[in-house]
Image (tube, helix red, strand yellow):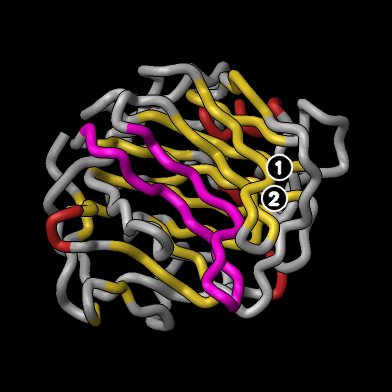
Amino acid sequence: MPDNDIGWGQGAVNNDIGWGKAQLNNTIGFGAIYENSPSGDTNLIGGTPTPPVPEGIANNYSMNFDSGSSDYISTPIFSELDGLTTLSFSAWIKPTSSTTSSILSIQDNSGFEQLSIIRHSTGYLIGKIYSGSTNRRTLTASPNIAPLNVWTHIAFTVDLSQASGSRGKLYINGSDVTSSDSTNQATINTSGGGIYIGKRNVISDLYFNGKLDEIGIWNTALTSTQVSQIYNGTATNLTKDLTTVSGSNLVYWNRMGD
């Protein structure tokens, strides 16, 4: 498989990818990447579709994040993600460093983090939901489930209307691996805030080091069946068309160059 990663630099300001230059199938709602310099890989292999998923689409690029260069993606928040009690995030990740790092951070207009996903240095995932500056919910997944130098599918789903202990779930390669779920209620408030992919913008930056691909955000809570569809909808050089996840409400999709 030849290396096919999106390189950084051209068209970026302060290592922040600018939005607005549209590219076919690159995002839902707005454009993204300015440069298409190949330098990595995206041979994503999920489950084994039976039969092969007919809506699979070409996947030849990923985005390479280098924590030493402070690479990340940011965009202002959009109305479809404000005042929610449900939200989902999906991505393929290939970490190349054991340093604790941020995959996703969503903030409000005061700079308070409202939702985040962190890969801990030991390999496990942490999902957090906040209310204002207060940490209201923390979810963790078992250690050593997001290994280095391996493409892994992750998903984080939130439904704050559910009973305590089942409001948030973390998935790895299509399976629910949530090991703990705190019990406080919260509403996700993102008014006037922003989305950061590959870093945090509060407390410490925690830049991601590795590759990310097929970033999807929904303002609904994906079911376990829907998460499995995304993971299983891959084959060599193919990935799931996120617009075909039945019953979901996709509001952001960054294909990282495809």
- Asked if the magenta segment contains residue 107, the reply would be yes
Total tally of numbered discs in the picture = 2
Q: Residue at x 16, y 77 (%)?
A: 10
Circle 2 packing at 10 Å, graded few (<14), some (14-19), many (20+), is many
Q: Which residue is mark 1?
A: 158
Q: Along the horizontal axis of the image, is 47 left or right of 162?
A: left
Q: Residue at x 42, y 63 (%)?
A: 202
Which picture quadrant has residue 185? top right
First in sequence: mark 2 or mark 1? 2
Q: Position of residue 140 (x, y in %)?
A: 54, 28
- Asked if the magenta segment contains residue 51, the reply would be no
Label number found at residue 87? 2
Foreground residue, 181 or 157?
181
Q: From the image, give the main secondary structure of the stretch colored magenta.
A: strand
Where disc 2 sits, the SS reads strand
- Which quadrant of the rendered structure holds the C terminus? bottom left
**Amino acid at pointer 2:** Leu
Foreground residue, 194 or 152?
194
Q: Along the horizontal axis of the image, is 8 left or right of 197?
A: left
Labelled pair 2, 1 in contact (Cβ < 8 Å): yes
Foreground residue, 193 or 248?
193
Q: Position of residue 255 (x, y in %)?
A: 41, 56
- Which quadrant of the rendered structure holds the N terminus? top left
Q: From this viewpoint, is residue 258 visible? A: no
Q: Along the horizontal axis of the image, is 64 left or right of 156?
A: left
Foreground residue, 19 or 145?
145
Q: What's the magenta region? A: 98-120
